[in-house]
Amino acid sequence: MKKIAILGSTGSIGTQTVDILPSVGAEVVALTTNKRINLLEEQARALHPEMVCAFDEAAARDLKIKLADTDIRVLSGMGGLTACAAESGADMVVTAVVGMVGLLPTLAAIDAGKDIALANKETLVCAGELVMRAAREKGVQLLPVDSEHSAIFQCAQAAQGNRLAKIILTASGGPFFGWTAAQMRDVTREQALAHPNWSMGAKITIDSATMMNKGLELIEAMWLYDMAPEDIEIVIHRESIVHSAVEFDDGAVLAQLGLPDMRLPIQYALTWPQRAACKVPRLRLAEAAKLTFFAPDYEAFPALGLAQRAAAQKGDRGAVLNGANEAAVGLFLAGRLGFAEIAESVARALDAIPCQKELTLDGVLAADAAARELVLAHSPI
């Protein structure tokens, strides 16, 4: 039986991972959250892991009281998150935390020789060169959980030694497809959080609304599949049925299709190379009726161009891009920044912070911190 640790088990990806466990037949040995300790307690009592972690110190103290009648170890902070990733008896670590916080635990898990079911795209955005090198040296698998990257991964298995000429990365377009750049300046928090197809956490939903999420996925795909950024095409696909596609040298295009449900790509990452019955609704093409595709509007969604710029420059640009975006999205959700100012803040950080081409872990952390500080310093409120 495969043993897994789920980092971020109380979030959207984490709870869906727990949901498909009966289909996978895995044993859970570690669970983590930030502050949602009531749900984590419920999961812990149902799944009986060896250890749990609440990243927030105060939440961890409360969780320890709640689980005092069990023999489950209760940890906290980055040390606890890293221990759940590296020191538990897991064979595979599901990295479902959101943001830069996932980088150090992922590196620790790789160093410990554990395979990674990767749902934390920021890990590769910020330090893809370091992470992929570490995975190769340790001989561990990085199995993508994002629906788009899972689709690419599934299609690429048909390559049989042939190179991928292009990746076609699909995007729903979010709630503001067809809006002009001028209209985007008046977007409210409530409008930005109303995604038409997917149920996700607040940060990822805002990233989808700005289309920064697709820019981050472009950088992630560049590292996962060793592709030049110019060979990754972004296409708007409103129905979210075609999850992404690959093109070969002869022009053949293979795509993976399915209804928008994250449980399938999560389960495939856990069962690969095998497939198991999955309790997701089945796609009926006659009911889907039509599939539409559009080129993205780079004027209305400038985050896409910023991500492509960071991808082309490499070095610490991904860390600057991501750190500035995380800080700006946090300010927007707190009502301290306008929607259009998210991308403007990221652009300011990329312009102001000198590019470091030689990438080190310390350099990644420094670039992330500098980008966040710059965005907060320019906050109008």
Image (spheres, rainbow, N blue to C red):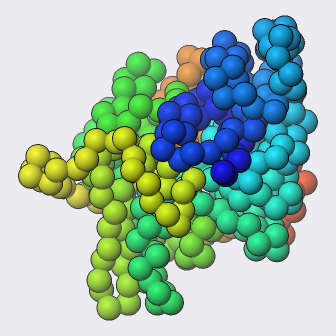
Position above or below: 363 against 104: below
In the image, is 126 to the left or to the right of 199? right
Q: At which x and y percent is residue 28? A: 69, 38
In the image, is 176 to the left or to the right of 379? left
Question: What residue appears at the point 62 percent right and 45 percent down from the top-left corner?
Answer: 26
Position above or below: 308 against 371: below
Residue situated in front as seen by the camera: 142 or 5: 5
Q: Going by the picture, which residue comes out furthest to the front?
A: 1
Residue situated in front as seen by the camera: 353 or 258: 258
Residue situated in front as seen by the camera: 236 or 143: 143
Q: At which x and y percent is residue 93? A: 71, 49
Give the quadrant of the C terminus: top right
Does residue 380 show up?
no
Q: At which x and y percent is residue 48? A: 72, 28
Does residue 159 show up?
yes
Question: What residue appears at the point 38 percent right and 84 percent down from the top-left corner?
Answer: 248
The quarter of the picture where residue 235 lies is: bottom left
The quarter of the picture where residue 371 lies is: top right
Position above or below: 354 against 52: below
Question: What residue appears at the point 69 percent right and 20 percent down from the top-left corner?
Answer: 45
Question: What residue appears at the point 39 percent right and 46 percent down from the top-left corner?
Answer: 278
Q: At which x and y percent is residue 192? A: 41, 28
State how many labels appear: 0
Position above or below: 69 against 302: above
